[in-house]
Image: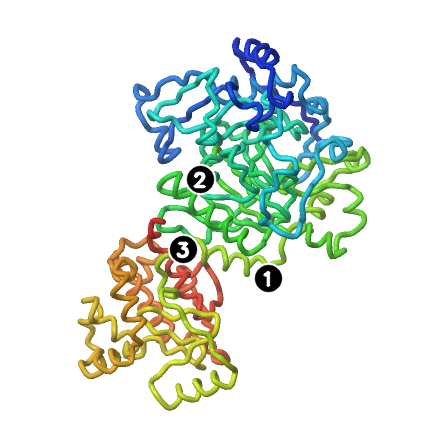
Amino acid sequence: MMQLSIKRVPTVVSNYQKDEADETAGRSGGCGKNCLRSCCIPGAKLPLYAFKKVGNIEKEKDVPEIENKEPPIAFLDSLVLGEWEDRMQRGLFRYDVTACETKVISGEYGFIAQLNEGRHLKKRPTEFRVDKVLQPFDGNKFNFTKVGQEEVLFQFEASEDGEVQFFPKAPIDVENSPSVVAINVSPIEYGHVLLIPRILECLPQRIDHKSFLLALYMAAEAGNPYFRLGYNSLGAFATINHLHFQAYYLAAPFPIEKAPTKKIITLNDGVIVSELLKYPVRGLVFEGGNTLQDLSDTVSDACICLQDNNIPYNVLISDCGKRIFLLPQCYAEKQALGEVSSELLDTQVNPAVWEISGHMVLKRRKDYDEASEENAWRLLAEVSLSDERFQEVNALIFEAIAGEEDGIENVAEVEERDTEAQSLEKENAVASSSHHAMVAGTQECLVLHLSFSSPELEVWDSLFRAAPICDFTPELSRHPSLSSERREEGRKMLPQRLKKTITDNPKKLANLIDLVNLPSPVREFVGQSQISRLGCFMRVWSYIKENNLQDPNNKNLVNCDEKLRSILLGKPRVELAELPALIKLHFPKVPK
């Protein structure tokens, strides 16, 4: 075991802090608690750090030094940690976290154990249901507008002129609801703070695109890989239903950061998605991206997908915002079902983002003294989804990442079958005519007129089903397989509502047929540098047919060979219904 001591970063406590404290103490009025509600905000001032928005963290470092002005204050050392030290000197914390024993557990991963006896008795209890990820904000319960202004370190907003600025005393802009950084009065580690986006809007604990990008900017601004941000959803051990991220400084690598990963795909916007390997909790890792916004949007889409599907999850923002771990979990669900052993329950460890990342906050001396990699692994294994469930969740995530704006698979709505008998009649009709049955709960392809109900999905045999689009795209109208008779027959068959959808949505259509520069895996598969999404789908389907990759026992399944796996997330088997969304991952997103 290696004993750790709190490694304090050299900080500079600015001169204004004492003056600001005296001024706050002398101000009277409101409810007397100096809170962040309407009763106490008038006339209040807080420090404001205005950060510079960057497109890409890596590229920003390549700007010549002459263009990089020295920031007015060191963000991490003097502002975050310096202000945190000041609040510790004022006695605002419930205990001195710097006195907690900490050690690195011997083993391959180097899990970190901290003894924080009684923290669960000193921190605020959970005040909401743990079986619902999305719950409305309740102003009657504890929220961050009720904290004293002395707990707030500074306001954190984007600079209006594109340069970093710092204002020691700035009015609180109530109308625009500032984002703030405040202390966690029950800290886990040195410098433990909370980032609370748009605090006065009283947002519930749910990730949105704007707030997640703000968290990445904070990680980038800190510029230190030992300063990390984390997020816990409801059901994944968030204890307050008011949107917030946590962050702290720990001068040691997290075990999760050392775990190997396997690349799944590089998205068209440059974001690389990988799967976490040889770690007790299954998860995805996101990094790269042409811009910081690209990375943020992709992870936000994934988080929103989990929220909408009531799947609890945790997020770790690592490496100055350049690497993000997304970790769906089920520990609270297992607890409720009585599936967690009493031995683990007795530890009273609630595995949230920090524990999952490998920083184990232990409540009992016994657990700390007996801490081992095996014990840490056993606890975290209970957090993880099963492999089967994880793959199901991944399918939801990748569908969300692909987007819903213009997919081949979802442009036109499909009406549900009225009864099982009617569906059987329709299937019989398929066998004796050219009409195509539809399945309840699926959506029909705008162009391809796909049917997932027939025993075999003959998507492009002689391109008959694609014929109607020839009026709108030269790519298909020139195809030699389409005779004028078939084109006319197809045109008559196409329902009027699909025709209207095509003509009313030229942008959606364009996104299907416009040529796109291809990422390397797809370029190698199709043998050319550019192709439309529709054309790519046609190539994939032709490849499946030519190589007899459909499962002989279930034609709606495709057994992928090595070449096909290279563009389908490495999956050994996929359903035909998944193909459009999987192919779409390689093509640019439509801006929201």
| Residue linked to disc 2 | 210
In the displayed structure, does residue 119 sit left or right of residue 568? right
**Quick check: 235 left or right of 548?**
right
Taking depth in this image into account, of 289 and 498 the one nearest to the observer is: 498
**Left or right of residue 575: residue 147:** right
Q: Secondary structure at mark 1?
A: helix
| Above or below: residue 433 compared with residue 14 | below
Location of residue 237 in the rendering, given as x and y in whole percent from the top left corner: 65, 43
For residue 388, the mark is 1
Residue 552 at what x, y percent from top left?
47, 80
List x then y, in percent, for residue 255: 61, 39
Give the residue displayed 35% in from the left and 71% down from the top. Answer: 541
* Contact, mark 3 vs mark 2 (Cβ under 8 Å): no
Q: Kindly identify the amino acid type of the residue bearing the numbered disc 1.
A: Glu
Distance from Cα at disc 2 to Cα at disc 1: 32 Å
Q: Is residue 255 at least partly visible in the picture?
A: yes
Mark 3 — residue? 403
Please tell me which of labels 3 and 1 falls first in the chain: 1
